[in-house]
Image: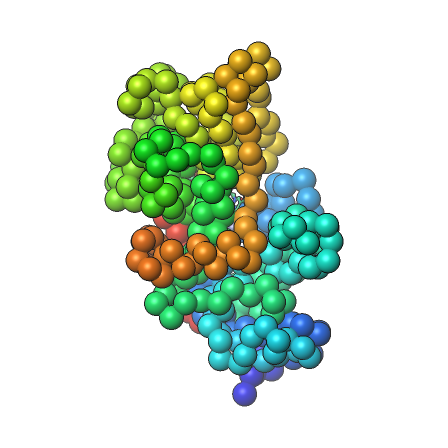
Amino acid sequence: NVPKRHKVAIFREQGGPITIEDADVVHDLPRGQALVRVIYSGVCHTDLHANLGDWPVPNKLPLIGGHEGAGVVVKLGEGADQHVKIGDRVGIKWINSSCGDCVYCRKSHEPNCVKAECSGFSVDGSFQQYAVADAKSLTPIPAALSLETAAPLLCAGVTVYKACRQANFTPGDTVVIVGSGGGLGHLATQYASYMGARVIGIDTGADKKALSAKCGAEVFIDFNQSKDLIADIKAATPDGLGPQAAIVAASGAKAYEQALEYLRPRGTLVPVGLPPNATIKADVFWTVFKSLSIVASYVGNRQEAIEALDIAARGKINVVSRTLGLTDLPEVYKQMHNGQIAGRIVLDIDR
Ligand code: 8ID
Ligand code: ZN
C-alpha cells in the first residue's frame, strides 16, 4: 500500500526556488536499500548551503534536500532485511551510505568513507514523503523519543555529540559554544553540559540568549554587543585564562576569527560550522607557544548516532524546535538566512 506518487520539495538549480511537487515514488529498490515513509524532518543550515550552492563541492541537481528525516520503514530492497524490518522507526542522517570496506570505514570513520553518499546532497533526502536510504546506515529511533523530537538529533545532535567528544575537555572545564542559539549550538550547549562542561554561549539577540540559558549556558555573550570578545570570554572563565575548548557551530566566517586567541593554553578549537570561503588563521608562534589544537569534527558514525539519540531518550537533552509544514520550507530558508531561528525548525512532511 505504498502509493505511486508522493509530495516532494525540490529545487532544480543552485539558488533556485524550492517547489512542492508530485513525483513518482521509487518502488524499485536497489540491493540493501530501504524505503522510508518520512513523517518529520529537521531543517539544517547545511540544506540551505546546498540550495545556495555556496560550498566548493557540487550537489546533485535537481535535488530533494533534507538529512534529519524521521519515519518508518515501509519497503525493503533485497538484503535490506539484514538491517531493518518493515515498521521500524528509523532516522535518515547525513551519511546516507558508506561502503564499509575502505580504510576509513574499517576504522569506523564512516563520514570520511571514500564512497560516502550524503542525504539531501549527493542523493535525494528527507524533504519528501517516501525516501530511499541505505538500510544499514539508518539510525534506529528509541521508543522514548517521538519522531518529531528525534529529527533534529539525526544531524544536529549527532554532530555536536561527536564534536564534544573530540573537544578534549574534562568535567569542570569551561567550553565556549559559538552559535549557542542555533540548531546545532543549542544541542551542543546541552551535550557539553551533560559531559560536565561549564558552558559560555555566544550568539546574538534576546531569543538566543534565553535559549542558551535554558540549555545550560552559565554565561551568554552577545557577539554583536561585546566590544572586546576575547577579553569578555576570558573574564568569564574562573581563572581568567580562557576556555579549554571552543566548539564553533555557527554558519558565519566571523565566528572563527578570534577563537584561537581566547582559548587557554593547551586548548582545543573544534571547527564544525561550515561558512563558505572561510579560513582559520592561526598565528604560528602563539599556536605553538600555547600548544593549541584544532580538531575539526564532521557529523558522526552509526554508533555515535545511536549514542546521541540514547542520551536524549534518557531525558538528558531537550530538543527545542518549532514544527511547520513542508510547504513552509522556502520561508524557513529565508528566516535561517536572516539568523531569525532560535533552535531548530522541524517540518511535518504531510503539511
Ligand atoms: O558535521 C558538521 N561539521 C556539520 C553538521 C551539520 C551542520 C556542520 N554543519 C554546519 C552547517 O552547514 C552550518 O554552517 O554548521 C553550521 C550551523 O548549522 P545550524 O546549527 O543548522 O545553523 P543555524 O541554526 O542557522 O545556527 C547558526 C547560529 O550561528 C549564529 C547564528 O546567530 C545562529 O544562531 N552565529 C553566526 I551566523 N555568526 C556568529 C558569530 N560570529 C554566530 N554566533 C556567534 N558568533
Ligand atoms: Zn545537518
Q: How many numbered marks have been drawn onto this rendered protein structure?
A: 0
Is the residue 1 above or below the residue 321 in the image? below
Q: Is residue 245 visible?
A: yes
Q: Residue 137, percent across and down?
A: 59, 63
Residue under the point 53% across and 57% down: 303
Q: How is the image coloured?
A: rainbow
Q: State the quadrant of the C terminus.
A: bottom left
Occupied quadrant, residue 287: top right
- In the rendered structure, the answer to whether residue 113 lies left or right of residue 168 reads right
> In the rendered view, would you say 277 is above or below 18?
above
Outermost residue, bottom direction? Answer: 1
Residue depicted at x 30% and y 58% = 315
Give the vertical position of 198 relative to 331 (above or below).
above
Q: Residue at x 59, y 49 (%)?
A: 50
The percent coordinates of residue 220 (x first, y second) are 29, 31
The residue positioned 33% from the left and 53% from the top of the image is 317
Tell me where residue 109 appears, x and y as whole percent. Answer: 63, 49
Compared to residue 92, the image places residue 234 above or below, namely above
Nearer to me, 198 or 208: 198
Q: Quadrant of the N terminus?
A: bottom right
284 displayed left or right of 201: right
Q: Position of residue 118 (x, y in %)?
A: 63, 55
Does the image show residue 328?
no
